[in-house]
Image: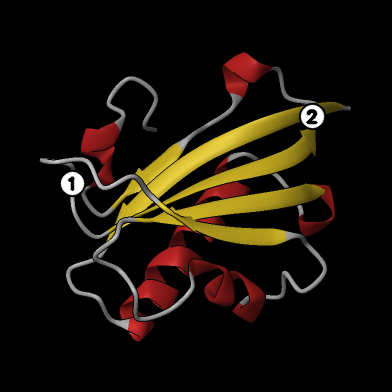
């Protein structure tokens, strides 16, 4: 079994707790499904949100889908002039037998523009 990091991001239309919960749930579900990762394979999840998002913690959405025993942390993304707004980024640390070259990084809801090189 290998220890791997999986990246992803999603964008919101507005700073709204319900939209954040839906977007984070969708993103995590897609990452897990596309990489065939089970909840027992999760080691930890690191979230960042752009400074314009403050209605809720992205980790709260993860707790809402049953990740109660997975260590989660949230941080604020750097406030870079001209950066894409209303973005939630995530990095999952997982145990998997997949080689690094087969990891599927997931970018949704317009966030694909952030990493055209690795977005699936």
Res 33 seen here: no
Element under disc 1: loop
Between 36 and 80, the residue placed more toward the observer is 80
Mark 1 residue crowding within 10 angstroms, few (<14) / some (14–19) / many (20+): some
For the point 48% across and 73% down, the residue is 57
On screen, residue 78 above or below 6: below
Q: Who's the residue at 52% across and 32% down the image? A: 104
Q: Which quarter shows the C terminus?
A: top left
In this view, the residue in front, 68 or 22, is 68
Percent from the top left, x then y, of residue 82?
10, 40
- Circle 1 sits on which residue? 84
Residue 35 lies, with reference to residue 15, above or below; the image says above
Asked whether residue 18 is in view, the answer is: yes
Q: Secondary structure at mark 2?
A: strand
Nearer the camera: disc 2 or disc 1 = 1
Q: Is residue 29 left or right of residue 83?
A: right
x and y percent of residue 78 in the render?
A: 33, 44
Query: What is the quadrant of residue 119 in the picture?
Result: top left
- Residue 10, compared with residue 99, is above or below; it is below
Circle on res. 3: 2
Q: Residue furthest left?
A: 82
Position of the N terminus, as image quadrant, is top right
Marks 2 and 1 sit apart, C-alpha to C-alpha, by: 30 Å
Residue 54: numbered disc = none
């Amino acid at each position: 079994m290998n220890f791997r990091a999986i990246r992803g991001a999603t964008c919101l239309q507005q700073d709204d707790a319900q939209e954040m919960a839906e977007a984070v749930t969708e993103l995590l579900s897609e990452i897990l499904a596309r990489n065939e990762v089970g909840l027992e394979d999760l080691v930890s999840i690191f979230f960042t949100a752009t400074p314009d998002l403050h209605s809720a913690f992205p980790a709260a959405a993860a707790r809402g889908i049953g990740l109660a025993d997975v260590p989660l942390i949230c941080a604020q993304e750097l406030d870079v002039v001209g950066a894409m707004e209303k973005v939630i980024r995530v990095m999952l640390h997982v145990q998997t037998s997949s080689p690094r070259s087969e990891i599927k990084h997931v970018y949704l809801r317009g966030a694909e523009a952030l990493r055209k090189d690795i977005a699936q």
